[in-house]
């Protein structure tokens, strides 16, 4: 009987992590931030059917990037777990911390024992009650089960470091929804392009609402909150040059190769 090839555990874990990071980075990013009335979640997502942001329970939202079929299974499992706990005990016993720990244990188990890790990053967000007594929480869970408890904002997906720095520079304590949303859009887009409302998926957890506080922002409401972005330097000259040319405009590089583009399984 031939002996199997030996791979050092350190090398095996590194290869798995590199594989997951590379494929997650191909996807479009997601950002969540705390604002004066709750929690805002925004993602670059032109699809109106494949959602990256969803409701989990009364005051809890779910966001994810990576392979759609994998993180949607996790979303449904989270909904079932929250419903079961709320039914068995009480609705107040369902919290984001316990749900984040459950996700972390499962992702860590898959990363350690399965051949292929899950190509996902997950965000579990919760807003505190309207009368105080709790704080807004953002839990960022990586593909290997690592959990980060973020205190102001959290960034998932491709170009996370650059988006994090732009958001850090723009951060204002106690800002309102419009200011937080426009800062999030600018951070997601970067200095060289802009994002139209049709290219965004946006939702909020509104602290002052009773019961289910999750609400999507779209259509005229979203368009009314998005401030016109000034054109970058040299854009006017480039526009005049393009008007005088009959050559078709080339798509943005991310549209030509993106893990969340043509393949629905990679959303």
Image (cartoon, rainbow, N blue to C red):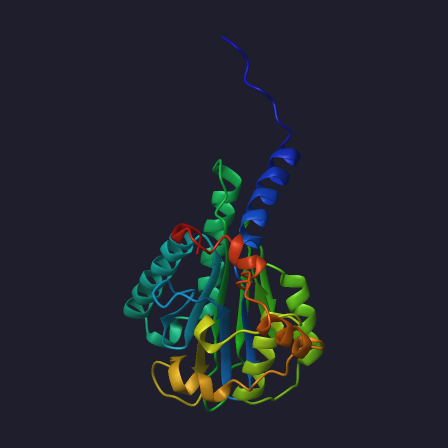
- Measured as percent of width and height from the top left, residue 239 is found at 62, 75
160 or 99, nearer to the observer:
160
- Measured as percent of width and height from the top left, residue 47 is found at 39, 65
Tell me if residue 204 comes above or below residue 165 in the rendering: below
Residue 145 visible (yes or no): no
- Measured as percent of width and height from the top left, residue 43 is found at 50, 69
Tell me if residue 90 comes above or below residue 156 in the rendering: below
Tell me if residue 47 comes above or below residue 209 in the rendering: above
Of all residues shown, which one is farthest toward the top? Answer: 1
> In the drawing, does residue 67 fall left or right of residue 31?
left
> In the drawing, does residue 201 fall left or right of residue 257?
left
Quadrant where the C terminus sits is bottom left
Residue 65 visible (yes or no): yes
Residue at 43% of width from left, 71% of height from top? 61
Give the total of numbered labels.
Answer: 0
Residue at 43% of width from left, 74% of height from top? 198
> In the drawing, does residue 46 fall left or right of residue 49?
right
Of all residues shown, which one is farthest toward the left? Answer: 87
- Measured as percent of width and height from the top left, residue 167 is found at 65, 74
Tell me if residue 103 comes above or below residue 246 in the rendering: above
53 or 99, nearer to the observer:
53
Residue at 47% of width from left, 61% of height from top? 64
Residue at 35% of width from left, 80% of height from top? 212
């Amino acid at each position: 009987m031939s002996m199997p090839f030996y791979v050092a555990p350190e090398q095996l874990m590194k290869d798995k992590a590199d594989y997951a990071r590379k494929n997650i980075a191909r996807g479009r990013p997601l950002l969540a931030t705390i604002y004066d009335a709750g929690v805002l979640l925004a993602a670059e997502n032109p699809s109106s059917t494949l959602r990256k942001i969803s409701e989990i329970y009364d005051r809890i939202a779910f966001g994810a990037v990576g392979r759609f079929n994998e993180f949607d299974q996790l979303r449904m499992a989270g909904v079932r777990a929250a419903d079961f706990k709320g039914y068995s005990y009480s609705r107040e016993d369902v919290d984001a911390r316990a749900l984040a720990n459950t996700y972390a244990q499962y992702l860590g188990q898959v990363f350690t024992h399965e051949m292929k890790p899950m190509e996902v990053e997950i965000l579990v967000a919760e807003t505190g009650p309207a009368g105080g007594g709790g704080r807004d929480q953002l839990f960022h869970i990586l593909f290997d089960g690592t959990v980060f408890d973020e205190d102001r904002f959290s960034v998932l997906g491709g170009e996370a470091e650059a988006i994090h720095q732009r958001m850090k520079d723009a951060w204002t304590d106690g800002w309102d929804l419009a200011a937080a949303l426009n800062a999030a859009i600018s951070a997601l887009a970067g200095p060289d392009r802009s994002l139209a409302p049709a290219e965004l998926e946006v939702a909020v957890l509104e602290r002052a609402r009773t019961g289910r506080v999750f609400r999507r922002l779209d259509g005229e409401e979203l368009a009314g909150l998005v401030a016109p972005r000034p054109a970058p330097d040299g854009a006017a000259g480039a526009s005049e040059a393009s008007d005088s040319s009959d050559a078709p405009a080339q798509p943005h590089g991310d549209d030509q190769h993106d893990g969340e583009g043509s393949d629905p399984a990679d959303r």
